[in-house]
Image (cartoon, helix red, strand yellow):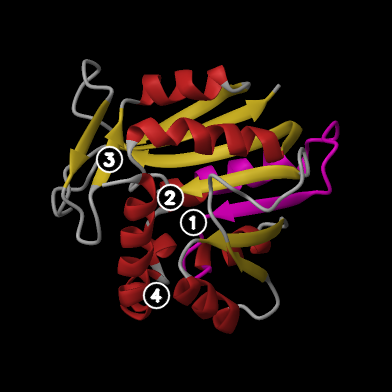
Amino acid sequence: MTELDTLTATRDAYDAIATVYQQQFQDSLRDRPLERAMLGAFAELVRSTDDSEGEGEVADLGCGPGYVTAHLHGLGLKAFGVDASPVMVALAQASHPGLRFEVGLMAELDIEDGSLRGVLSRWSVIHTPPQEVPAIVAEIARVLAPGGHLLIDFPATDGPHLETQSYDHVVATAYRWNPDRLAALLREHGLAEVGRMTIEPLPTDRRQFQEVELLARKA
């Protein structure tokens, strides 16, 4: 399957389940105190970055129906959402009319160089084949202002000997990353790791994967 085929299949799949997805996950942060804490730390760092040359905006890439974009806004950030799924974007616009949402591709962002103070990528690269993720990281580095921060979330591999692992996702094939490998990829594009959080799965979770939240800063 080509890159375009993969993207089209993933977009169409999320278009088809967008309404159900919104209903199922719109309150998901309520039961995730550790993730809320990391989002809070991200917001605090973004707000305190006085040497940033950006306009203070933060992009939520793969925003889905927009509830995390709205959460960032509630934390005092000038946040907007980008998603490849037109249906997701329409739901986000209807649910949060005071915020900006747009259809776009993570590897081809319609955003000026160095114009963002922060980028959130919350599980948004999991359906991207590993060989195509460097192009997305390069694009994130391009749009971040010096001193800007990236918070990227992803499921981790089963061990350090595995750089990536694929798994069957209910929507489309998804991929797990070794945290050190992804951190190295960020460094290759000028994004230095600031910190990371590893969240262990609950015994009742369907997927027994560790979740990693990796925070990085553009030099």
Which mark is in front, 4 or 2? 2
Calculate the distance from the C-alpha at mark 1 to the C-alpha at mark 4.
13 Å
Give the class, few, some or many, for how many residues have Cα within 10 Å of label 3's Cα (few <14, many ≥20).
many
Among the two numbered marks 4 and 3 on one chain, the one whose residue lies closer to the N terminus: 4
Stretch in magenta: 37-66
Give the class, few, some or many, for how many residues have Cα within 10 Å of label 2's Cα (few <14, many ≥20).
some
- At label 2, which amino acid type do we have? Ser
Say which residue label 4 marks: 22
Say which residue label 2 marks: 124
- At label 1, which amino acid type do we have? Gly
Calculate the distance from the C-alpha at mark 4 to the C-alpha at mark 3.
22 Å
- At label 4, which amino acid type do we have? Gln
Among the two numbered marks 3 and 2 on one chain, the one whose residue lies closer to the N terminus: 2
- At label 3, which amino acid type do we have? Tyr
Are the residues flagged by discs 4 and 3 in contact, CB closer than 8 Å? no
x then y, percent, for residue 43: 65, 46
Are the residues flagged by discs 1 and 2 in contact, CB closer than 8 Å? yes
Q: Quadrant of residue 44?
A: top right
Q: Quadrant of the C terminus?
A: top right
User: Residue drawn at (18%, 28%), measured in percent from left and top?
Assistant: 158
Among the two numbered marks 4 and 2 on one chain, the one whose residue lies closer to the N terminus: 4
- Between 114 and 196, which is closer to the camera in this rendering? 114
Say which residue label 3 marks: 175
Among the two numbered marks 1 and 4 on one chain, the one whose residue lies closer to the N terminus: 4
Say which residue label 1 marks: 62
Q: Quadrant of residue 99?
A: bottom right
Secondary structure beneath label 3: strand
Secondary structure beneath label 1: loop
Secondary structure beneath label 4: helix
Calculate the distance from the C-alpha at mark 3 to the C-alpha at mark 2.
11 Å
